[in-house]
Amino acid sequence: MKYNALKGVHDIFPPDIHLWQKVEQTARDIFSVYGFQELRAPIIEATDVFTRSIGETSDIVEKEMYTFNDKADRRITLRPEGTAPVVRCYVENHLYNLPSPQKYFYSGPMFRYERPQSGRFRQFYQIGAEAFGVGGPKIDAEILSMLKLFFERLGLKELNFQINSIGCDKCRPDYRKALLDFFSDRLEGLCQDCKRRYDINPLRILDCKVEACIKLKDGAPYVTDFLCGECREHFNALQSFLNLLDVPYVINPNMVRGLDYYTRTTFEVTCEHLGSQNAVAAGGRYDKLVQEFGGPPTPAIGFAAGMERLTTLLKLSSIEKVPSPKVFIAILGTTAEKESLAIATRLREEGIWTELGYAGNSLKSQLRRADKLSAEYVFIIGDDEITAGKLKWKKLSDGNQGEMLFTDIYDFLK
Ligand code: HAM
């Protein structure tokens, strides 16, 4: 019997895993200097955690969640995103009692039953961050400049920062009314889902991926034209902070985002090299969500970046060096086998990556393996070398070679 991975999921293994580790390490380094600490929430949650926050009319909740009943008949969902679980954790553990802002980052797999295509998976990985307790626009700008630094440290270029404001409870009703007016004589042409969304949440029509709906939303009113005084002030201040911090951005008034919990600032970072699934990171403010989860009124903002898309960009943009062993010990004979094991153990104890040749393989095939692994040095040990207490060494990059006493190995490598 032969098994394959399920559709839309993928394995990650060397050499690609090194790119993944680089992204994760860079994120840890950058996010931590901005004061974000790691938070690990479970992969499964009660389904309500997602339906109530992401929104009943969103694509994710309507079509994409992996939901099942557990043995006690509870509705359980594999997390499609990371924000709702972090908010659930924040409220459940009363983290709002700690001084504001509380800042957390997370990484791990998310699950959405989407149509798989390049850059879009059913199990994909996000690395994200959320900041709780500050309502002003300065922290929005800090988060965007943290993202900028993160991408710079990864060596990623040609990224576009798009920002928008989608208003608050005060301005949303006017915008909603304008959308209802706009779509009222286009209703017939909309897909079945959008006909339903028209009554419940017309904003979601703007996010529909159906070709007919995309055409019909052409000319729809912009949310930015309906912002109340406070939302406008917030958005203007954000822009002046971004100018101050040298974060290049464009305003995209069409960007409403596919999740319902957003208020005010939303943003996406895109890259043309990624094709149609071009968002590497996205996020925004969700000032009402903590309260909706039973916590005190707590403004919040965050983002998540897609690991598959980040590593794809890294692959396209750099000649990332795959890590390789410092030493490969090739052996001739059984006495050498024991000696090599002892030497390798000592070197490994000193933190030196050491690979071994194994008895039964010819010297030629051992050297071929050393070459394939891109080992820095090859040590050759045979019975003659053991009698003399010496080994032969060769540096593979320049072909230099020589002999040394076993007792000198550590100093030589230093
Ligand atoms: P999102 O826009 O749904 O936002 O996802 C964020 C990022 O995850 C996307 O920009 C993309 O890079 C990646 N992504 C999403 N779906 C897939 C997929 N099917 N395959 C591969 N990559 C994917 C959120 O999830 C929000 N929780 C972000 C947020 C955090 N907002 C506030 N805080």
Image (cartoon, helix red, strand yellow):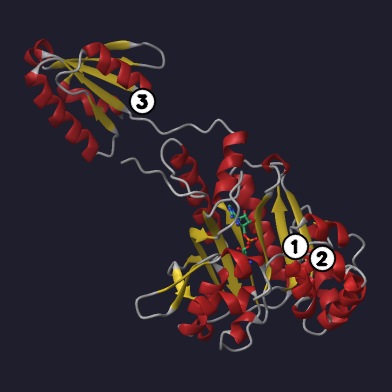
Camera-nearest label, 1 or 2 = 2
Residue 337 drawn above or below residue 350 = above
The residue that label 1 is drawn on is 208
Check disc 1: other Cα within 10 Å, few if <14, some if 14-19, many if 20+: many
Q: Is residue 350 visible?
A: yes
Along the polypeptide, which appears first: circle 3 or circle 2? 2
Which structural element holds mark 2? loop
Check disc 2: other Cα within 10 Å, few if <14, some if 14-19, many if 20+: many
Q: Quadrant of residue 142?
A: bottom right
- Determine the CA span between mark 1 and mark 2: 10 Å
Q: Is residue 101 visible?
A: no
Camera-nearest label, 3 or 1 = 1
Check disc 3: other Cα within 10 Å, few if <14, some if 14-19, many if 20+: some
Name the residue: 69% across, 41% down: 157
Along the polypeptide, which appears first: circle 3 or circle 1? 1
Along the polypeptide, which appears first: circle 1 or circle 2? 2
Q: Position of residue 151 (x, y in %)?
A: 63, 48
Which structural element holds mark 3? loop
Q: Position of residue 410 (x, y in %)?
A: 23, 29
Which amino acid does the dot numbered 2 rest on? Leu
Residues marked 1 and 2 touching at CB (< 8 Å): yes
Which amino acid does the dot numbered 1 rest on? Cys
Instruction: Name the image quarter holding the N terminus.
Output: top left
Which disc number belongs to residue 190? 2
